[in-house]
Amino acid sequence: MQEQAAESATEASTVRYAYKASLIGAAHQFELTDEGFGWRLAGRSSVWPYCEIAAIRLSYRPVSMQQHRFRADICHASGARLWILSTSWQTAALMAPQDKDYRAFIVELHGRMQRVGSKAELTAGLGHTTYTAALALVSLVAAMLLALFVGALAVGAWAGALFFIGFTALFAWQVGGFIRRNRPSAYGFDHIPKTLLP
């Protein structure tokens, strides 16, 4: 009876998450147990004690099939790295969100690491170099759109000017959200960025 009770307690304390990174192959599986962060993917598996997780980076990674997609990069003290996505491939035309399960798993991972006194580096958004390059690219595109808009006004192409206004609004809405959410910053276990969780 005691062994069964212990097994039940262990099972109850285990939190699981899985997603398919592509249509081909098995799902990537993760679990949080008393022993640590367990993972199974591409025929390999391991358990990383929470104190051996060196870093976590949270980011917003939309794609054409799913605009509302988030990612967590987990880095082990050995340098090994893997990532967890908030979406899962279902069919060739459907990438389904798993917002509730992803959020619960990421929050619980942070909580368990905090309870063991983890000193992991917690960062939000893109790396500084990548973010700077993204800002430069966005600025270049914005300057090109402005030049085209001014040119359309100069020759009286009102339909073209209206098109550029609409395109610019769409560009600002999609790319602006990506830039805003992915601004590089550090955070603490008690302050997981809400903008980087579904």
Image (cartoon, helix red, strand yellow):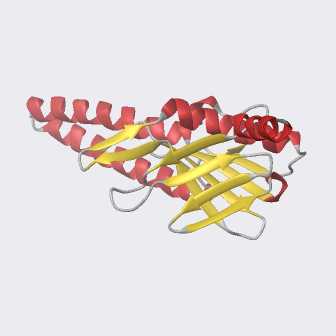
Number of disc labels: 0
Image quadrant in which you'd find residue 39? bottom right
Q: Position of residue 178 (x, y in %)?
A: 47, 41
Horizontally, residue 132 falls left or right of residue 140, namely: right
The outermost residue toward the right is: 117
Q: Residue at x 71, y 34 (%)?
A: 12
Q: Residue at x 24, y 30 (%)?
A: 165
Give the image location of residue 50, x and y in percent.
Answer: 80, 52
* For residue 150, side relative to residue 85 (left or right): left
In x, y percent, where is residue 24? 34, 61
* Residue drawn at the location 23% of the way across and 30% of the way down: 166
> In this orientation, which residue lies closer to the viewer: 101 or 127?
101
Residue 198 visible in the shown view:
no
Looking at the image, the residue that sits furthest to the front is: 1
Task: Please indicate, yes or no, whether residue 181 appears anywhere in the rendered image.
Answer: yes
Which residue is at a point 38% across and 36% down the rendered structure image?
174
Foreground of the two, 21 or 3: 3
What is the quadrant of the N terminus in the image? top right
Rendering coords of residue 105 (x, y %): 63, 38
Question: Looking at this view, is 95 or 32 the one in front?
Answer: 32
26 and 71: which one is in front? 26
Instruction: Please state if 50 lies on the left or on the right of 149 as rendered.
Output: right
